Amino acid sequence: MSTPTTTRRDPLPVFCFLVRFTSLPGNVETFFKSASGLRAETEVVPVRAGGANDTTFNLVGAMKWSPLVLKQGFTQSSGLLAWREKWTQGTMQRSDGSIIQLDTALKPCAQWDFVRGWPSKWEIGEFDASKNELAIETLEISHDGLKFTAVG
């Protein structure tokens, strides 16, 4: 019987991840219901050149980073809400952090590090007495960049 020469590379599940804030007191590490905004875009700057009427040249512009959108069940002891409250009171502290994707054995396998993040928006879902749902808080983190790292 022959042994395989390549390592199997299964797609990673989207339900296994955690978020770490490395610059907040106690290095806050928590699980969220969802995380989105892992997105970067390079601006395209169209330039017309004199005498070249058949084309527009596309130059590379500035890098734009989407805010990270984190959702979790609301609890009274939310350390992230306390971080946001400090911002509303003028005590502004940025934090680096990571979104860490886990495999089905809960081992880290990919990581996106963000730099100089700050809570730009906080929201709690609608209260509705006719529904039987959890209260979900949404926190948007604006930041100055993302870096991908393969782990393991």
Image (spheres, rainbow, N blue to C red):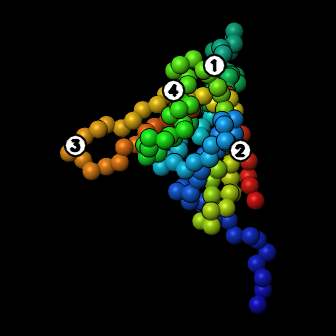
Secondary element at tag 2: strand
Quote the CA–CA distance across marks 4 and 3.
27 Å
- Circle 1 residues within 10 Å: few <14, some 14–19, many ≥20: few
Circles 3 and 1 in contact, beta carbons < 8 Å: no
Which residue carries the number 1 mark?
46
- Say which mark, if any, is on residue 121: none
Residue 92 pos. (x, y %): 62, 22
Viewer-proximal residue, 86 or 100?
86
Which residue carries the number 4 mark?
85
Disc nearer the start of the sequence (4/1):
1
Residue sitting at 59 percent across and 40 percent down? Answer: 38
- The reply, left or right, for residue 137 in relation to residue 23 is left
Query: Which quadrant: the N terminus?
Result: bottom right
Viewer-proximal residue, 123 or 146?
123
Residue sitting at 66 percent across and 37 percent down? Answer: 25
Q: Report which quarter residue 130 is drawn in.
A: top left
Secondary element at tag 1: strand
Disc nearer the start of the sequence (3/2):
3
Q: Report which quarter residue 103 is drawn in.
A: bottom right
Residue type at the position of mark 2 = Phe
Circles 2 and 4 in contact, beta carbons < 8 Å: no
Q: Report which quarter residue 65 is drawn in.
A: top right
Which residue carries the number 3 mark?
129
Secondary element at tag 4: helix
Residue type at the position of mark 4 = Glu
